[in-house]
Image: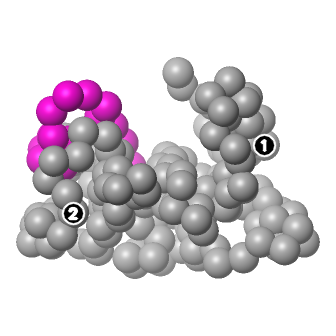
Amino acid sequence: MCGIIGYVGERPCRDILFRGLRKLEYRGYDSAGISVVEEGGFKLLHSVGNLDRLEAVLDQIDSTSSVGIAHTRWATHGRPSNENAHPHTDCTGRFAIVLNGIVENYLSLRAELQEEGDGGYQEGVGGERGEELRGHDGVEPALQAFVSRAVHQLRNSRSGRGRLIR
C-alpha cells in the first residue's frame, strides 16, 4: 500500500519527510521518493527497494528546504523503477505530484495529452497529471480550480473518481 508525507513549514523538511516514510514501512512498498523545493524548482530523489537505498543517497537533496513531499509506492501499474517512483514532476519541473491508488483511465488520459503534443511520460500512472499542469500560470485560485478539474478526471477502483484533499 502506498503512503504520502508532505511538509510545509519553518523547519528543514528532508529528514522530516524521510522519518515519515520510515513510519509507513509496515504498509509495504517497492520504491520510494522525495521531492523538495530547491532554487525555484523541485529536486527529485527516487530509489527502488527498501528505504535504506533512499537513505544512502539522501544527501543529494537540499537539507535546508522547508517544503516537500515524499511517497512510498507499491507498483500496481508499471514496474518498480526509479522512473516510476513518485513524486513525478511536469516537464518544466514547476509542479511535483504524488498519488495513491490505481488510475484506471490512465491510457485515455495519456492519449489525450499526446494528441495535444505533450510527451515524456513515465510508464506508471502519475506523470500524466504532472504533465497536464505544465504551462499553468500559477495564480493560486486558478491553480486550485485547475487541480480540482484534473483530479476529477481520474477514475479509480475505490472511489470512482479522484479526490482533492485540501
| Point 90% across, 71% down: residue | 115
**Mark earlier in primary sequence (1, 2):** 2
Q: Is residue 72 left or right of residue 114?
A: left
Classify mark 1: residues with Cα within 10 Å, few (<14), some (14-19) or many (20+): some
The x, y position of residue 49, in whole percent, is 24, 72
In the displayed structure, does residue 78 sit left or right of residue 9?
right
Q: Where is residue 17 in the image (x, y as percent from the top left)?
A: 21, 44
The answer, for residue 126, to whether it is visible in the render is: no
Residue at left 72%, top 76%?
Answer: 119
Highlighted magenta segment, given as a residue range:
1-19
State the image coordinates of residue 21 (x, y, percent, origin top left). Answer: 21, 47
Residue 80 in sight = yes
Q: Residue beneath label 1, please?
A: 153
The image quarter in which residue 20 lies: top left
Mark 2: which amino acid? Answer: Ile
Q: Verify CB contact (< 8 Å) between mark 1 and mark 2.
A: no
Check if residue 89 falls in the magenta segment.
Answer: no
Label 1 amino acid?
A: Gln
Choose top left, top right, bottom left or bottom right for residue 41: bottom left
Task: Quickly name the residue at label 2.
Answer: 61
- Is residue 143 toward the left or the right of residue 149 in the image? left
Number of numbered discs overlaid on the protein picture = 2
Classify 33 as above or below 81.
above
Q: What element carries label 1?
A: loop
- Residue farthest to the right? 115
Extreme residue toward the front, this view: 39
- Residue drawn 73% across the image and 36% down it: 146
26 and 149: which one is in front? 149
78 vs 100: above or below: below
Q: Residues within 10 Å of mark 2 (few under 14, many from 20)?
A: some
Q: Rounded to the nearest whole Å, what is the CA distance between mark 1 and mark 2?
A: 32 Å
- SS for callout 2: loop
